Image (tube, rainbow, N blue to C red):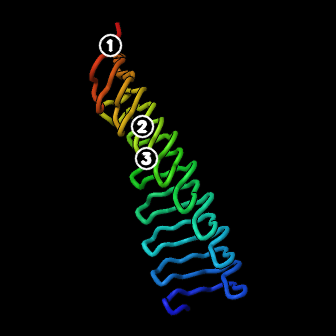
Amino acid sequence: TNANGDKNVGAFKEDVKAGQGTFIYANGNKYSGAFEADDKNGRGTYTYANGDKYVGTFKDDVEKGQGILTYANGDKYVGGFNQGVKSGEGAFTFANGDKYVGQFLENRFNGQGTFSWPDGSKYEGRWADGVKTGQGKKTWGPATMFAGDTYVGDFQKDKLNGQGTYNYANGDIYVGTFKDGLKGGLGTFTEPD
């Protein structure tokens, strides 16, 4: 036990942590796994005092490579980490049933990804800094007031923005411009015969 309350149980080599061991921090956090040159290196489990838990690989004392981060609130991330943050391919499942599968950068949805909601709705397309941005397709699920409708086109700031095609479940089609989620500007509306 150190003077600050940290406690190490495990292998030492020349007064540094090396090999398998457990380190309990004074703040209640706990790491069990591989150490090399006094740092977390290799497979390990880091349990936070708040109940969050990471199981995966570490490099130079931070999460790097593949891992699973389970949050105390029921959220869960499975995928890549780089320098301690979600990065690369991964899947984030929210406790409420929402799910994102795709690319991450610095803990945010970034790149190509699919977000699905428990009501059956789904968005497939581009993300930037955690919001729908660029080309995408939104399909409204059966438990929504827009059940069966689809939109393919531009998104900006999480909304239909720019050129797109909106197909209504009844067969109507609107092709044109959207602004802040609404039809606006030039467009063509077609009803089935």
Q: Nearer the viewer, mark 1 or mark 2?
A: 2
Q: Which residue is mark 3?
A: 129
Residue position marked by numbered label 1 in the rendering: 188
Specify few, some or many for label 3: CA neighbours under 10 Å numbering under 14, 14-19, or 20 or more.
some
Which labelled disc corresponds to residue 133?
2
Identified by mark 3, the residue type is Asp
Q: Is residue 63 above or below residue 28?
A: above
Quadrant in which the N terminus appears: bottom right
Q: Secondary structure at mark 2?
A: strand
- Residue 122: image tag: none
Q: Is residue 71 above or below residue 31?
A: above
Residue at 66% x, 76% y is 35
Residues tagged 1 and 3 counted as in contact (Cβ below 8 A): no
Amino acid type at circle 2 is Thr
- Foreground tag (1 vs 3): 3
Q: Residues within 10 Å of mark 2 (few under 14, many from 20)?
A: many
Q: Quadrant of residue 180?
A: top left
x, y percent for residue 47: 52, 72
Residue 137 higher or lower than 107, as above or below: above
Task: Look at the numbered discs 3 and 2 and tell me whether their residues touch, using CB distance below 8 Å.
Answer: yes
